[in-house]
Image: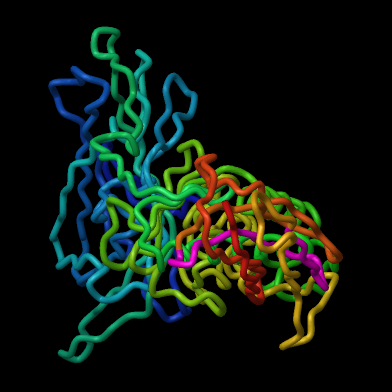
């Protein structure tokens, strides 16, 4: 989505582009007003709308060293962050590239700029935006700027506190003539080799997962359904008394709360009952990434990476929280203005309007486990799975279970060797007695062979299993 930028006062630096400098951190921090950005396009023009290159240059025009967090600029390993605003004849063109959840930044994630040093990279916008329609396009660089500065004091190097802000360049113009217009190819379809190892669990398709990864991914989806459900139920129900909402989204405001309430409803519905896909190993993963999505991809697809597999199921920066972070990009159009708990909370305090548009704020409110209408005592049994009937069975079986409180559940049949046979139902269920019927077929519609199976009921808090024998 397009950001609403707060342009900070700075003189225009070049006709091609300008960095609107960042807001400082603490009061004694020097704001580095010397980092400049420029855009340029090839003089030869565009001959194929699928290859629209711009050159991006960042330069330290000052006398002190600067360092900039690369993930908010086009200098990422992906080389395609949503760092541009593209318009055709005055109308916005949607970003088609990736949105990424990164791990906390390390020193290696910063670009160092000596005084007078510049860095240049080339970005193929034709792979990230649809230029298939002839017309006049304008392109501006836009990104969050975050960095560190250092200065020399009494002959010794001295760190200056971190600075942060947003920048937007002057536009460059790109003309697409009719003869250069080509059909747009979505980036998630470019050079993609299909991975045959796919598993279907209810409405979710899992791609490229080992047996243990499949179980962990399914548990994460069920937990994300529960987490989003709790956030939906709790948000806006207690006004300013919801201190978790105030902490992550700023001073209480009913209109802004209505926005987050709708976000969690959409996310809850997707994880609990609507089609989606999860890749257990995204084809473009690299170090320091939890997961990524393409917001325009249908059905919504989450590509998880090493950061996801190292994340816990509860606490902070969790597996289900990562899924909520990424799905908020797809369904709610959130951006990544701030990463990490400290910066996300600061964003809520200083700019609540952006906090409700920031993916990490959505994740952290969900992970805060906001108070829901029905509380469950620690250690209490929340779900009971009754023996299947009939058992042994010559065909299908009735599966009955009970819940002590509202929540997200998944009811599935597994083989003795740990293979998912069929997801019978998945979604948000009210407290009380429930019954489902398994027709004896697997996910492909084939009759399950004779043998021993396990029926497993998974909730956000626990998992229950019962043995089922099939006869033929």
Magenta-colored stretch includes residue 9 = no
Q: Residue furthest top?
A: 179
- Residue depicted at 33% across the width and 53% down the height: 282
* Figure label count: 0
For the magenta stretch, what is the residue range? 399-418
- Residue depicted at 35% across the width and 13% down the height: 134
- Residue depicted at 60% across the width and 59% down the height: 412
Q: Nearer the viewer, residue 452 or 340?
A: 452
Q: Which color scheme does this rendered protein use?
A: rainbow
Return the x and y of residue 173 as percentages of the image width and height: 31, 26
Return the x and y of residue 46 as percentages of the image width and height: 20, 20
User: Is 434 situated left or right of 115 in this image?
Assistant: right
User: Is 371 situated left or right of 183 in this image?
Assistant: right
Residue 89 in the image: above or below residue 62: above
- Residue depicted at 48% across the width and 29% down the height: 92
- The chief SS type of the magenta part is strand
Return the x and y of residue 324 as percentages of the image width and height: 56, 59
Residue 234 in sight in this render = no
User: Is 26 situated left or right of 245 in this image?
Assistant: left
Residue 393 in the image: above or below residue 347: above
Residue 461 in the image: above or below residue 400: below
Residue 27 in sight in this render = yes
Q: Quadrant of residue 231?
A: bottom right
Q: Residue furthest front?
A: 472
Magenta-colored stretch includes residue 414 = yes
Q: Nearer the viewer, residue 467 or 194?
A: 467
């Amino acid at each position: 989505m397009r950001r609403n930028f707060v342009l900070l006062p700075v003189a225009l630096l070049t006709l091609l582009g300008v960095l609107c400098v960042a807001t400082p951190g603490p009061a004694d921090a020097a704001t580095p007003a010397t980092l400049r950005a420029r855009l340029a396009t090839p003089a030869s023009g565009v001959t194929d709308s699928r290859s629209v290159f711009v050159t991006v240059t960042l330069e330290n025009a000052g006398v002190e060293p600067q360092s900039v967090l690369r993930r908010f600029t086009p200098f990422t390993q992906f080389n395609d962050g949503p760092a541009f605003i593209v318009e055709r004849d005055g109308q916005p063109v949607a970003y088609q590239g990736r949105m990424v959840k990164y791990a906390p930044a390390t020193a290696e994630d910063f670009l160092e700029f000596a005084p007078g040093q510049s860095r240049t990279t080339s970005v193929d916008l034709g792979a990230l935006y649809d230029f298939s329609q002839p017309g006049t396009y304008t392109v501006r660089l836009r990104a969050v700027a975050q960095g560190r500065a250092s200065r020399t004091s009494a002959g010794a190097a001295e760190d200056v506190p971190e600075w942060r802000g947003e920048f937007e360049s002057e536009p460059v113009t790109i003309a697409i003539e009719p003869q250069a217009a080509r059909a747009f190819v979505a980036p998630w379809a470019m050079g993609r080799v299909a991975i045959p190892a796919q598993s279907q669990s209810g409405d979710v398709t899992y791609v490229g997962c080992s047996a243990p990864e499949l179980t962990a991914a399914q548990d994460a989806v069920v937990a994300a359904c529960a987490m989003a459900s709790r956030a939906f139920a709790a948000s806006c129900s207690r006004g300013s008394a919801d201190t978790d909402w105030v902490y992550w989204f700023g001073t209480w405001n009913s209109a802004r709360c209505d926005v987050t309430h709708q976000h969690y409803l959409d996310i809850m519905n997707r994880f609990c009952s609507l089609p989606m896909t999860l890749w257990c190993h995204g084809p473009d993963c690299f170090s320091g990434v939890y997961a990524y999505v393409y917001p325009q991809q249908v059905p919504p697809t989450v590509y998880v990476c090493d950061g996801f597999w190292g994340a816990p199921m509860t606490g902070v920066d969790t597996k289900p929280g990562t899924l909520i972070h990424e799905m908020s990009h797809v369904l709610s159009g959130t951006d990544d203005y701030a990463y990490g708990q400290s910066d996300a909370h600061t964003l809520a305090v200083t700019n609540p309007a952006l906090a409700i548009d920031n993916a990490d704020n959505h994740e952290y409110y969900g992970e805060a486990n906001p108070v829901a209408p029905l509380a469950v005592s620690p250690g209490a049994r929340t779900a009971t799975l009754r023996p299947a009937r009939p058992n042994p069975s010559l065909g299908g079986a009735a599966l009955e279970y009970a819940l002590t409180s509202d929540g997200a559940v998944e009811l599935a049949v597994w083989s003795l060797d740990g293979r998912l046979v069929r997801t019978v139902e998945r979604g948000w269920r009210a407290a009380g007695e429930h019954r489902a019927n398994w027709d004896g077929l697997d996910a492909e519609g084939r009759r399950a062979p004779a043998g021993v199976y396990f029926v497993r009921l998974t909730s956000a808090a626990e998992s229950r299993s019962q043995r089922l024998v099939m006869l033929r």
